[in-house]
Image: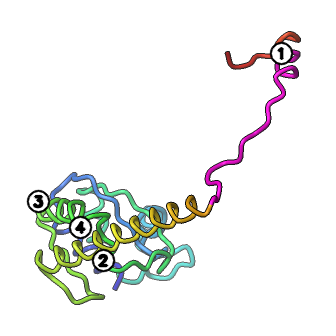
Amino acid sequence: MELRAVTEGLKVLPKRCAVIVRSDSQYVQRGITAWISRWKSNGWRTSYGQPVLNKDLWRELDKLDASCAPEWRWIKGHADDWKLDRFGRSLRHLVNALADLESLDVSFISLKDNLDGRLMFQIIGAMAEFERALTQERVKAGLRNARAKGKRLGRPRVAVDYSQVARLRESGLPGRR
């Protein structure tokens, strides 16, 4: 399944485009970057002498790898299991990211949220931007409240012994001037 997903994704890209393929499958990542050259030299047999599974998919992926030259990266599965409403940092970023995807003829479909289309992205992006503004407002209000109660904010002041600084400079140690 992982091989088919990567293969189908690379098929729609223009040749020699800059693309990074991220996969949580070490089988795919190691297969295309490390093992495939040995498989080909061994007549499509593994180091144990067994026939390579899914040889037809590996051959197709090898051709696509040669024409697209993607950068292959392994990522830990579900390490950053993010939701669609966190895709863009702001509504502007979300719309720009979608425009970039569209310029490459890439359709963005969230299988997890079962969404497709710019209207839903704009609604979700607006909600995310509103939530961000609300969080900023609450933090600022909390800081104002703490100051009003006499709390000292920021780093504590450091007492400087200027006579010791002068002695150190005289002894030849560099210092800020």
Q: What is the distance, in whole Å, between disc 2 and disc 1 at their CAs? A: 57 Å
The residue beneath circle 1 is 166
The residue beneath circle 4 is 10
Label 1 Cα crowd, 10 Å radius (few <14 / some 14-19 / many 20+): few
Label 2 Cα crowd, 10 Å radius (few <14 / some 14-19 / many 20+): some
Mark 1 near mark 3, Cβ–Cβ under 8 Å?
Answer: no
Residue 154 in magenta stretch: yes
The residue beneath circle 2 is 85
The residue mark sitting in front, 1 or 4, is 1
User: Left of 119 or right of it: where is 20?
Assistant: right
Q: Helix, strand, or loop for circle 1? A: helix
Q: What is the distance, in whole Å, between disc 4 and disc 2 at their CAs? A: 26 Å
Q: Is residue 177 above or below residue 81?
A: above
User: Left of 126 or right of it: where is 85?
Assistant: right
Q: Helix, strand, or loop for circle 3? A: helix
The residue beneath circle 3 is 103
Specify the amino acid type for callout 2: Asp
The residue mark sitting in front, 4 or 2, is 2
